[in-house]
Amino acid sequence: MAIIEVKHLTKEYKLGALTGIKDSFRQGLAKITGRETWQRERFKALDDVNFSIEEGEVVGIIGHNGAGKSTLLKHLANITNPTRGEVHVRGSVAPLIEVGAGLNPELTGRENIYLNGAILGIPRKKIKEKLDEIIDFSELEQFIDTPVKRYSSGMTVKLGFSIATSMDADILVVDEVLAVGDLAFQRKCFDRMEELIKRQGKTILLVSHNIRQVERMCERVILMNQGVMAADGRPKEICTRFYSENDEKIKLQTAKVGGARREMTGGVEVKQIELLDKSGRGVEDVDYADSLIIRLTIVTSIVLNKPYFGIGVHTTDFLYLATENTDDLFQEKTLYPGTHVIEMKVSSFPFLPGAYSIRVGIGGGDISKPLFYEESMFTFLVKMPGRHIRSTMKEGFVSLSPEWTLVG
Amino acid sequence: MIGVIKNLVDYRELIAALAWKNIVVRYKQAYLGILWAVLKPVMLMLIFTLVKAFVGIDSGEIPYPILTFAALLPWVFFQESTSEGINSVTGNAALIKKIYFPREVFPLTAMVTKLVELAISFLILAAMMVYYQMVPSVYALWVPVIILYTMVVALTISFFGAAMNVYYRDVGQMLPVALSLLMYASPVIYPLSLVHQKLMVEKAAGEWSETFYMIYTANPLAGIIDSFQRVMLKGLPPDFNSLMPGLIAIAILLPLSYLFFKRAESWFADII
């Protein structure tokens, strides 16, 4: 029998401010006198969500901000009630929703262990037994008798995580918590979670924006999109799908917002960037391993001796992947005021499917500093038409085009 | 109602932990600590004693300071636990949004928290009884029952008020005003015997006297304060005539108030 069952779950919130007594009074008056009453606009945070989770399953819930992930968890933890539909949970739920919630800043770490334990429903006797283990896991021996208000945020989370995972609940709900703490502690949290999954066979719900983490730990992933359950299935497929949706979104955003870093001393300006495919047509997106021409149209208002150009490719989060520079190639040339066109041809564009951006630098004369520099000037997608995108392609930027041999 | 008692048992560790947290947090960085809790009844007693010197209130054979302190002890307990109870849900918004347990834990915790402060007031009362050389009679065994009843009265208001306060914060603002008015309608400054004398013996309101007396005692605090003074200071059993109207009112209101709270509870996290 399913440990969690969600049927036609719909949750609506009213938009706008909560009415005060004055508005309620006016509403009531309008009702009595038979005049029109007004309703605040409604917003569907969850829209007809259906799924069931079996005991021992580890399920990841992913989606953009506002997709309804946390609202869904709130229903599972019985914090709020559905507008329509049903939620059945058989067993105790340990919420890890923002671990710090139950911690009181005035109390010491040790006092908080007892308090938070009581809030999570752990019997006092059991906390006493586990006290040393909890303190040990949190790595806070030295600070355990110091009020939590003097803790750093990382220390607070460590303490919260240690308490919550020591609880014997049937269902563990984890919301974005592993993202905090230093790398070493994150590693420890992973191990603790994996122990809970593998050895104790607990049912775990993991909400995270760290898709790699979800992909690694879960055996099933639910993708939420604007309150609707967009997909439910194997982690690889769904995470890959989410990645490509994300790339599209990032491309749209960067196109709107424009460049990030930008330096201009004047005199040189890039009018246009175009991507041309092998037949010379302007394109928005690029096919993987295809030949490609990046064409810059620039306008100069000064005489530029010894011009040089640089074009680089970076990810949408500004990891520089490749940078090409003409260096001394055009040392003998001089650009007079007017419009000029520069092309850079790449015979096989090496980057795997995803979203990428172009940065451009232009300089010249005897000044070493570029006269023009801008990042994120043009964002485009690399696609792989007709072929299924393997999810391993998401774990890197280039392909080694390997030839595998099984020797022996 | 059985649900409340069951929760009280099931969640006793949580209630104890939360109450302990309330007390520790409130007095942690205060040098005088929990002694601050008794400042209020002691100060009021001094003021009332001073006022009494001007207006003259007949306190019978019991010295006025201890009589009024014995009235202030249940009154302040009631007043404080009601205020705490009404604000207990809105004051724990962070928890309510994150975690589920029956929400009546919050008003119940408020009562338990104030019980600790009440215990300290009892020490002062004991000291005063030693000073006035008064010995409690066997009827003092009624005290736990009276205190329990006071908690039930405070809970009746708290359940309804706390739930209303989630929707309309006006309730939290209005309560201190209403409670300070109620104090004058309760036998705190003056003893109940004075009201009894005026209405039931002297028939000051003519044929309406009995009705007025009943309305007066429908305030459960009238019976509570009078009974507390009787069992602690006068060596008499509680006067059930003065308790009865209040008891009936509470017996009707408590289930209604609790039901209201339980029905509102499921929307707390959305509204708060």
Image: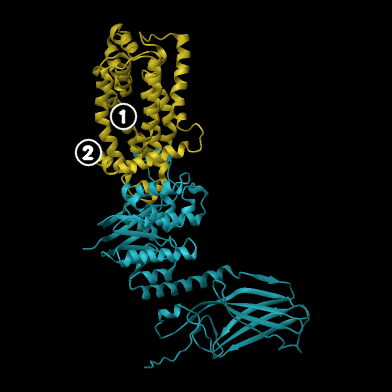
Specify whether A298 is left or right of A197: right
State whether residue A70 is above or below residue A255: above
Residue B257 sits in quarter:
top left
Marks 2 and 1, how far apart at CA: 17 Å
Q: Chain of mark 1?
A: B
Residue A7 sits in quarter:
bottom left
Q: Which mark is residue B2?
A: 2
Badge 1 crowding class, 10 Å Cα cut-off, few under 14, some 14 to 19, many 20 or more, is many
State whether residue B83 is above or below residue B100: above
Q: Chain of mark 2?
A: B
Q: Is residue A123 visible?
A: no
Question: Do the residues under discs 2 and 1 have CB atoms within 8 angstroms?
Answer: no
State whether residue A130 is above or below residue A279: above
Considering the numbered disc 2 on the image, is that residue within a helix, a strand or a loop? helix
Horizontal and vertical percent for residue B107?
A: 35, 38
Farthest-out residue, left: A1
Q: Is residue B143 visible?
A: yes
State whether residue B177 is above or below residue A240: above
Residue beneath disc 1: B153
Considering the numbered disc 1 on the image, is that residue within a helix, a strand or a loop? helix
Specify whether B36 is left or right of B109: right
Display colour for chain A: cyan
Q: Which chain is yellow?
A: B
Amino acid type for the residue under numbered disc 1 = Val
Horizontal and vertical percent for residue B112?
A: 35, 35
